[in-house]
Image (tube, rainbow, N blue to C red):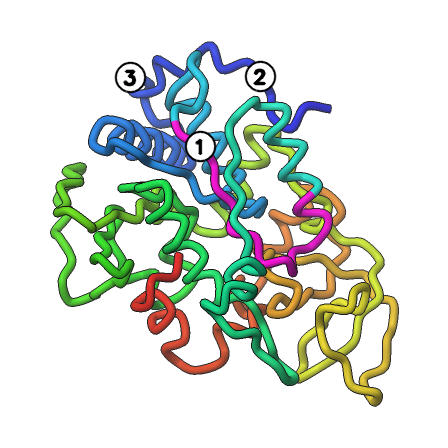
Amino acid sequence: MNIYTTDLSLAPELDSLKDTSNVNALENEAIYILREVAAQFEKPVLLFSGGKDSITLVRLAQKAFWPAKIPFPLMHIDTGHNFSETIEFRDRLVEELGVELIIRKVQDSINQGKVKEESGRYASRNSLQTTTLLDAIEEFKFDACVGGARRDEEKARAKERIFSVRDDFGQWDERNQRPELFDMLNGQIELGQNVRVFPISNWTELDVWSYIQEEHIEIPSIYFAHRRKTFLRDGMIWSADDNIVFREENEAVEERMVRFRTVGDMSCTAAVLSDAISIDKVVSEIRDSSISERGARIDDKRSEAAMEKRKQQGYF
């Protein structure tokens, strides 16, 4: 089975189509943003994690530039603590689409002494990605990094513009953002600056899943309910299938039916109980959910301003 359906013959006419649903309107907006990236920047890159949001971005980029190939590379900042299902899917997708994939590893940053491995019960490499990302931006001289962040995920992301200017050090200043009136996007930057671009900023988790459903997009199996060895900690369900997450002796392992709503590092991403084994069932589950998507991310719970602090330091 192909990861994507391949009939994109109508893609060039997307701008002229009358919106028939909210998802279609969001798709048109995202395609417009991606084309603006190609028009305004010299060396853009699409940040790809293998998660549902970046997979959706790849699909949108396909449509934006069809019948040509995606005109910029994909880049994955590999923490070394990724779920195996995500990495396997990443490699298969890249091979099928024939796009360039750049991989830069957090482990290399650790080996070079640029960052220090965390230790303890909640040790994670999530925040360490920032240094690896900024080094890669400098190495390849990227002036725009396209990411899959959405405003509904977290309050710091809700404040950020679609074209988010970062300074010479990759830092974000929420008090110094450009106005974005109507569909006017300003990509002019000074030497040393770069821009983070968020084409699906206005999408919700449900919008993403509705689009995946409508477009018949394949995603990693980890997003669907499956039996997995897990343990409980602080009211959250953690994977026990690996040696990445430190588990104490009194934390009993039990096999549960779970899925992952958001896919980050194994060290900071918890599962949720679920019986949703198909996209239709996932969509129904999300409609009925009263818990936010990133409620299963321990890295966002370190402080009330955890995400904002990471962004100010250059995070995605």
Report the mark closest to the observer, 2 or 1: 1
Residue at x 53% of width, y 62% of height: 293
**Quarter placement of the C terminus:** bottom left
Q: State the image coordinates of residue 159 (x, y, percent, origin top left).
A: 26, 62
Q: Residues within 10 Å of mark 2 (few under 14, many from 20)?
A: few
The boundaries of the magenta stretch are 72-87
Q: Amino acid at mark 3?
A: Ser
Q: Determine whether 39 is above or below 268 in the image.
A: above
- Left or right side of 78 for 26: left
| Camera-side residue of 230 and 166 | 166
| Marks 2,3: beta carbons within 8 A | no
| Camera-side residue of 132 and 236 | 132
The residue at which mark 3 appears reads as: 16
Q: Amino acid at mark 1?
A: Pro
- SS label for mark 2: loop
Q: Which residue occupies the extreme bottom position in the image?
A: 250
Q: Is residue 80 magenta?
A: yes
Report the mark closest to the observer, 2 or 3: 2
Q: Amino acid at mark 2?
A: Thr
Marks 2 and 3, Cα distance to the nearest angstrom?
21 Å
Label 2 vs 1, first from the N-terminus: 2
The residue at which mark 2 appears reads as: 6
Q: Which mark is residue 73?
A: 1
Q: Determine whether 123 is above or below 205 in the image.
A: below
